[in-house]
Image: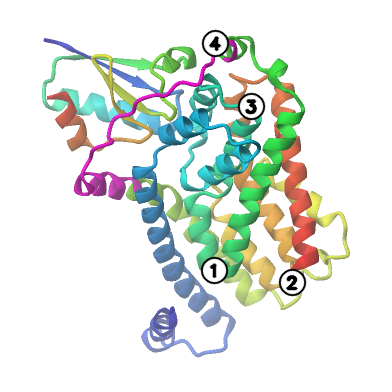
């Protein structure tokens, strides 16, 4: 499917610039051109498709659905699933949280959504497709959904309502299973198309520089770091590798979309895939800016518990992947 | 009649962009309007929005969860 990009990169590097095949420099450049085109292409496609889904199934509808239906345990899974198709900006986490609480949606279910939404977002999926292929992307998405579900169920069990800030407790007391009307239901596809295209542009503008930088760094490493270099330090036998990678990842902001291309090279050079996935999940799912925002609705202890549980689940899945893959 | 435009947002980059855009459009087209930034989360929640930034014109939610384009804003405001 991507042969043509390979050929294009061949032509640019070997015919156009006239480098000879097999040198580190040529390899690195070829890698950069090939990866950039492929990844940006997939990124555009995925972001656009998610935009279309989201236009017809906005967050308001998710909230109404979860508020209306009692699903006897399945609501965690559903909330987590909805998180996949809903784009998430950490600046919306607070209004979203309150809106869910107000609608009588249990705290654990809200958390399930809050975990999966950033974890399986359009940019991460697009990058994953380009870097690791369809099978790995599938595994990432499925495990992301399960991780959100599991975290939500655990958090519900802990009865954390008492750790909300006082005014949110008030909202909780007055909560009811209501339905909120939303505008934009009857737009034509043409109207939506313009808005979606605009969104795609905004999202890409935000991430493309980081992605290109990441691919460039990856390209250099690809050409110069010897095969199997990391196996020595980060082998599957090293039981501290997964937790260390996860904890290292949490403070990084999710806009570090540039990290994914680098991680791909690390995997190429011998870092176990489970350790790598745990690291990426840590980067994408949890970030310090988000924690700061959540302070408006949660006590520091609650944020601690929330991050703790999610980190625990990520570490768990890291180990799992190292065993089964 | 002068319009009241409220921009709801907790101060994220997207919200700031939206405020700037609205201000620009209002100035460029000499629209009589008062622009108010609503940054307090409790006030924002009065409008039942789940995602920010949101643009409210005369107490009616026009846009939410994304940065609008200038053309779109002009359409809403005129």
Residue denoted by label 3: A107
- List x then y, in percent, for residue B78: 12, 24
Q: Nearer the viewer, residue B49 or A247?
A: B49
The one nearer the camera, A22 or A265, is A265
Indicate the chain on which mark 4 is placed. A
For the residues bearing labels 1 and 3, Cβ distance under 8 angstroms: no
Q: Which chain is home to disc 1?
A: A
User: Are discs 2 and 1 both within one chain?
Assistant: yes
Disc 2 sits on a residue from what chain? A
Indicate the chain on which mark 3 is placed: A
The residue under label 2 is A270
Indicate which disc, 3 or 2, sits on the residue closer to the N terminus.
Answer: 3
Would you place residue A135 above or below residue A177 in this image? Answer: below
- Which of pointers 4 and 2 indicates the residue nearer the eye? 4
Task: Provide the residue designation for mark 4.
Answer: A174
Provide the residue span drawn in magenta.
Answer: A172-199
Q: Residue at 75% of width from left, 37% of height from top? A: A309
């Amino acid at each position: 499917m991507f042969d043509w990009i390979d050929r294009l990169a061949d032509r640019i590097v070997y015919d156009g610039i006239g480098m000879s095949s097999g040198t580190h420099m040529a390899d690195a450049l070829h890698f950069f051109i090939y990866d950039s085109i492929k990844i940006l292409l997939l990124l555009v496609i995925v972001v656009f498709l998610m935009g279309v889904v989201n236009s017809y199934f906005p967050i308001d509808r998710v909230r109404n659905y979860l508020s209306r239906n009692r699903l006897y345990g399945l609501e965690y899974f559903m909330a987590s699933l909805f998180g996949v198709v809903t784009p998430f900006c950490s600046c919306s986490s607070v209004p979203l949280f309150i809106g869910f609480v107000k609608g009588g949606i249990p705290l654990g279910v809200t958390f399930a959504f809050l975990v999966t939404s950033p974890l399986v977002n359009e940019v991460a999926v697009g990058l994953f497709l380009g870097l690791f292929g369809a099978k790995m992307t599938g595994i990432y998405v499925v495990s992301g959904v399960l991780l959100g579900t599991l975290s939500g169920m655990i958090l519900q069990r802990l009865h954390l309502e008492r750790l909300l800030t006082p005014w949110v407790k008030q909202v909780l007391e007055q909560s009811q299973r209501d339905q909120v009307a939303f505008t934009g239901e009857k737009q034509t596809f043409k109207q939506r198309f313009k808005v979606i295209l605009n969104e795609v542009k905004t999202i890409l503008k935000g991430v493309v520089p980081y992605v290109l930088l990441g691919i460039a760094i990856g390209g250099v490493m690809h050409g110069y770091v010897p095969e199997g270099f990391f196996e020595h330090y980060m082998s599957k036998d090293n039981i501290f590798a997964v937790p260390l990678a996860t904890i290292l990842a949490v403070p990084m902001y999710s806009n570090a979309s540039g990290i994914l291309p680098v991680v791909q090279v690390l995997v190429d050079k011998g870092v176990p895939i489970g350790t790598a996935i745990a690291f990426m999940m840590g980067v994408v799912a949890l970030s310090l800016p988000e924690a700061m925002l959540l302070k408006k609705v949660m006590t520091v202890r609650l944020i601690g518990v929330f991050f703790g549980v999610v980190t625990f689940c990520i570490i768990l899945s890291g180990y799992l992947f190292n065993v089964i893959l | 009649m002068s319009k009241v435009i409220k921009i709801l947002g907790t101060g994220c980059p997207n919200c700031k962009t939206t405020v700037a855009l609205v201000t620009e459009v209002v100035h460029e087209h000499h629209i009589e309007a008062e622009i108010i930034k609503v940054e307090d989360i409790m006030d924002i929640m009065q409008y039942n929005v789940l995602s920010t930034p949101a643009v409210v014109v005369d107490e009616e939610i026009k846009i939410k969860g994304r940065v609008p384009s200038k053309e779109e804003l002009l359409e809403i405001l005129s």
